[in-house]
Image: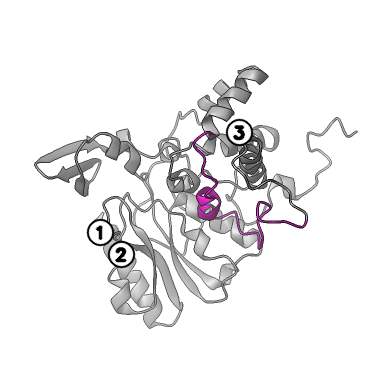
Amino acid sequence: MEEYSEKIREISKQLLAEGRVEMIIGFARGSVPMMNEPLIAVTAEEVEKLVWDSNCGINLTNYLTGRREKIGIVAKGCDSRNIVTHIIENKIRRDQLFIIGVPCRGMIDRRKIIAMFDMEIHEVVEDKDQIVVKGAGFEKTLNKKDVLQGNCAICLHRNPVIHDALIGDRVEEQKDVDRYVDVRRIEALSPEEKGRHFENLLKPCLRCYACRNACPLCYCPTCFVDEHRPQWVGKSQDPADVATFHFLRAFHCAGRCTDCGACERACPVGIEVRQFTKKLEKDCLELFTWEAGMSLDERPPLDVYRPEDPDGFIR
């Protein structure tokens, strides 16, 4: 993916040199394998640190909320859809942004790869559709499609929906992908089975709020879990309090979530928190034919009223 990195650097240097932006938000190589980190570059020297590969899973839209500067930002498909949501919700203006679009073939799941090896991984190299994992005394080549993040494996919008420059040819979008097979499996459970399922799912939760902090949609000045006048939810590890946090956070994302996977990627104990938001995503698609962040001209369905909305029980 070095050609992508070079193109990002080239565009970024030009934007800064011409004064069209005040900063570039992109990725730099992380201090450990498979963990690239966000970088805000304001000089040509800092731009040289910008990279792109399959370890750029963090959603950079998080760094746009409420900013006033002119900004260049690197965005893959899901990032661009969150940028659309930010613009619609007045968290950033379109004329502030120069969007460097990246056609994406998916991000790799570092947890999957780490689980395959008993020894420490020193280096992970990407070679087209293969991932080469290296350590002390071993080297193994993996197929990238086998180690993709869960959200990337079922993504139908890999190309940016809005951009000012595209750094490569558009990739072919995936077809015949069943995005909601796991949701339907949970829907088919009895109420008691559903209760046990989510109780077991949330048992490891530490209430660290990494999922919330990584989510580009969670930008309330004060989160409901931090309120104390009134206190909406307890702050203990009581299962009811833990479940309340996760369910309410998911509902706050209803009609807005792009399934970028930032929440699951950030969770230190590996909880599949997308199980909450994917159900609501499925409902919005089936009830309103709605996918978040696909157009600047439409607001989320829960944000507007239409007489034809499927709410017969109100009438």
Instruction: Identify the mark nearer the N-term, 2 or 3.
Output: 2
Report the Cα–Cα distance between label 3 and label 1: 37 Å
What's the amino acid at mark 2?
A: Lys
Question: Which residue is identified by label 3?
Answer: 279
- Dot 1: what SS? helix
Residue 2 shown left or right of residue 274 in the figure: left
Given residues 128 and 280, the one toward you in this image is 280
Question: Which residue is identified by label 2?
Answer: 7
Q: Which is in the foreground here, disc 2 or disc 3?
A: 3
Q: In which image quadrant can residue 36 be found?
A: bottom left
Q: Residue 3 — which label?
A: 1
Q: Dot 1: within a 10 Å radius of its alpha carbon, few (fewer than 14), some, or many (20 or more) residues?
A: few
Q: Position of residue 289 (x, y in %)?
A: 65, 37
Given residues 54 and 301, the one toward you in this image is 54
Given residues 162 and 43, the one toward you in this image is 43
Span of residues in magenta:
203-229
